[in-house]
Amino acid sequence: MTERSESHDDPFALHLAALAVLDDGGVVVGWNRRAQDLLGHPAAAVIGRPAAGVLLEPRDLPAAREAAASCRRADGWFGVLKVRHRDGRLVELGLRAHPVSRDDRIREWLLAGAPAVDVLEWQRDRAVLDGLYRRCPIGLVVHGTDLRLLRVNRAIERFTGVPAADFRGLATGCFLLPDDARRAVDRVRQVIETGRPMVYSEQFVRLQWDPAQERVAMVSSFPMKDPSGRVLGVAEMIEDITERHRAQRRLALLDQAGSRIGTTLDVAETARELAEVMVPHLADHASVDLLQPVTHGEEPTRALSGPLVRLGASAVGAQRPGPPHPQGEPVQFGPDTPQAKCLAEGRPVLEPVLPPDWFSTAGRQGTHAPGLGVHSLIVVPLAARGLVLGVMTLWRSLRPDPFEADDLTLAQELASRAAVAVDNARRFTQQQQTAFTLQSSLLPRSVPDQSAVEVALRYLPASAAPGLGGDWFDVIPLSGTRVALVVGDVVGRGIHAAATMGRLRTAVHTLASLDLEPDEVLSRLDDLVNLLAAEQEAAGERPVGEQVVGATCLYAVYDPVSGCCSLARAGHPPPVVTAPDGQATLLDLPAGPPLGLGGLPFEAREIDLVEGSLLCLYTNGVIGERHMDADTALAKLCAALTRPADALERTGQAVVDSLVPSRPSDDIALLIARTHMLPPDDVASWSLPPEPASAARARELTTAKLTEWGLEHLAFTTELIVSELVTNVYRYAGGAATLRLIRERSLVCEVSDTSHTSPHLRRARSTDEGGRGLFLVAQMAERWGTRYTREGKTVWTEQPLADSLV
């Protein structure tokens, strides 16, 4: 009786092995052809002879005897011995011995031998095959061509919890949920049909009896073929990479969060970015709620009281119901909700499994669940620099697996990063609000009452550049019903630029009150800018972008009596003038150097403006956008100003719509003025000779004109004012005097002469016979002053029309 091998490549198989039969005394009684081929001994040379004497060297006899003894004890033996070839060399053979008993109870031994190299190789192959099915941690599944399972290894048994023997004959994918099973069947069928392997394909796997546990497997499928190339089945190597996949997903989410969260210094936008990053990678629904003070740029109180504001919300799928509170709406959580607990304690809350009645429990109705089907919850605080700014809530409803501790760790990491971005945005908002408050306090809040021009103003801060700009505009009433129109731009950005703008604006008001000519005003401003730069340099303040190196300015004075406008500019864009017929042109005005260069003169130009003309002053931001060149921008500006009869607000908006992008890169200041002229009947002017009788003549002319205007109640005070001013001209100027009365919002009285001598107010002693004239004028007039021209000076007074001062 002999034992057959289980495999055709078994070196001890009957058709491959060298076979010999020994009797119980060790004499050879059987010898096959393979033994003769392997050792060179013919059967006649060995049969009937002791095997030890023919096949073994004397030095190998002890090992042979030990093997024979072991064989008798165990009824079999396997090992390696050196056997002598017919030519005398030794051949190392792997030997297997089995006892053979005949009916006559004669005991014999069957020896099967093969080269030791072949035996060892076959043993390794058997060990590998045994390892794949019994000890390999990677799953092995063998499918038949009929899509039935033939065999699985122990790893699959551990993966599924089903004994390996129970798989035989079952359909492919039988233990998976339908969607996962369909993908598994399609993969095996494709390999069978094409005969080509599919390597390293990922598949999400959910077992029928544990659908909430989602796993990820790496599957490599390859066909099994016979020598003719016919596909006999498909073998699949299946590795559970769930933890690796989750780790990779978390790392990818952290990397994505680094590039997507905090792209702007806007609190609301940062909250939205955080919510959007969380879905769908970590949660099905996410909401970000910040304490209300944080949304305004303020620091939250330690008590963490007050409502929260939902600034970020995201959900899976466009049709999925979102959180009940839309973005930007206040939310109030009940005292027993996870959000309230997280906010109060500053610690995260993990509810991996929520029972169906969890939301109906008293105190949790205010949890604001995003919809039905929610089964898992995470709430983490948004804390930065020791301050809790709000909370982030994550929900799962579509994904069956609950949140785990690793998910909580990841959510905390992302919330921590986002909280720093939110706090940076909060601080920036606070600084911007402070800066804008400063800037708005420096800019005019309303246009002062005056009749010379109708004005429309536009100021748009830059949204694409950090810090504040130094653009400003102003409308300043002057004496004689005139008005000064100012537009300027300080070089640089930030608080320093805004503060410098405020100082220059104050200086312009002071210089305007002196009734200086436009070119003279710019010369004084140039000195001031040089002084400011010198002060900063002396103090060592030279931060990039904050050092004041210059400014540009355009200063215009319009007289509604004469229609004359005097303008000068210091490196500023030229104004646009639109005639009543709609013709808009750039005013050819000497450019002048920017303020701060020093030493160079400024030139003024006078033009006559017809009533109803438009005068447009603007800063460089209007025409300085990168998407168009300056000539194109100026052409568009002129085109937007060709309808002078339109309302000024509409015209200003047309300029903005035509030239200003939605996010301008520079601050924009725009001033559009429509000119008016005083009716000739409201102005009276006389030239008076330098003689003592001129004062009396002035009083007569004044009384007559005031009676004509219906202002008799002002006759006494006006006669006194006119008399004193004309007398001063006669006594101190030595030339002819010009008297002018203007009826506007107030009664203006002007006396001009050719002298530049400055009149001044002084207090006369009780014994003095004179020196009280200007004092009386100052007491009777609401305002008075002196302005100088190239031809001389003008002393003016203003009196309210409503009543007299006496």
Image (tube, grey):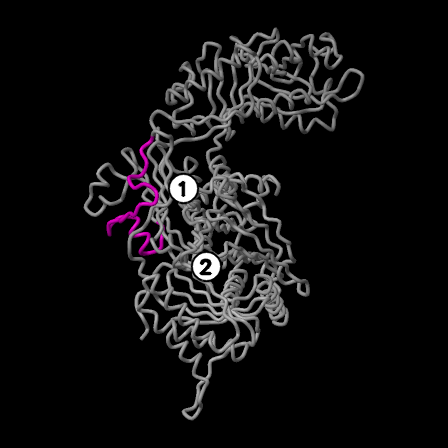
| Quarter of the image where the C terminus is located | bottom left
The kind of secondary structure element at disc 1 is helix
Q: Amino acid at mark 2?
A: Leu
Q: Position of residue 24 (x, y in %)?
A: 60, 17
Can residue 571 be seen in this snapshot?
yes
The region drawn magenta spans 320-348
Q: Where 81 falls versus 613 (above or below)?
A: above
The residue located at (41%, 37%) in the rendering is 279
**Percent position of residue 191, x then y:** 53, 14
- Asked if the stretch drawn in magenta spans residue 193, the answer is no
At x 63%, y 72%, the residue is 538
Front of the two marks 1 and 2: 2
Quarter-wise, where is residue 597 in the image?
A: bottom right
Seen at 31% across and 45% down, the residue is 329
Depth order, front residue of 684/50:
684
Please tell me which of labels 1 and 2 falls first in the chain: 1
Say which residue label 1 marks.
Answer: 275
